[in-house]
Amino acid sequence: MAQADAPALYWSEDVPDADWLGAVADPTVVDDAWRAWRDEVAFAEKLVADSPDLGIDEASPDRAEADFACLTREWDLACCAAAGAPPG
């Protein structure tokens, strides 16, 4: 929705499972995951507050779906790391 090309936090084209490889029960990893999640939430809240219209361009529904999937993966990573469990 923001039309921003931000780099992926937990993904790499060079490493197919990069989004899960770092999911370990380490306080530093957990803190980083929560920080990243809070940053994403803050960005979304600001976007909503500053937007006069939240309509999605009909030409880009796949982008919105991909953004949502990315946030879901990042949330899963944070939760699993906090619980000391493997990501699922």
Image (cartoon, helix red, strand yellow):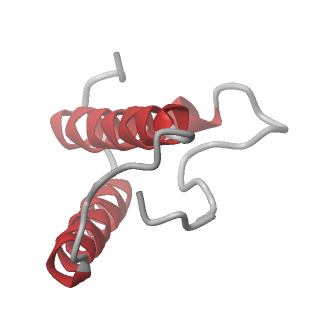
45 or 60: which is nearer to us? 60
Q: Is residue 6 above or below residue 52?
A: above
Q: Is residue 35 left or right of residue 70?
A: left
Q: Position of residue 69 (x, y in %)?
A: 41, 32
Q: Is residue 50 above or below residue 59?
A: below
- The outermost residue toward the bottom is 50
Residue in view at x 29 percent, y 33 percent: 76
Q: Quadrant of residue 33 in the image? A: bottom left
Q: Position of residue 79 (x, y in %)?
A: 20, 38
51 or 5: which is nearer to us? 51
Residue in view at x 24 percent, y 67 percent: 53
Q: Position of residue 17 (x, y in %)?
A: 64, 26
Residue in view at x 31 percent, y 41 percent: 25
In the rendered image, the quadrant that contains the C terminus is top left
5 or 88: which is nearer to us? 5
Q: Quadrant of residue 8 in the image? A: bottom right
Total marks drawn?
0
Q: Position of residue 35 (x, y in %)?
A: 28, 69
- The outermost residue toward the top is 88
Q: Is residue 21 left or right of residue 88?
A: right
In the rendered image, the quadrant that contains the N terminus is bottom left
Q: Quadrant of residue 75 in the image? A: top left
- The outermost residue toward the right is 14
Residue in view at x 73 percent, y 26 percent: 16
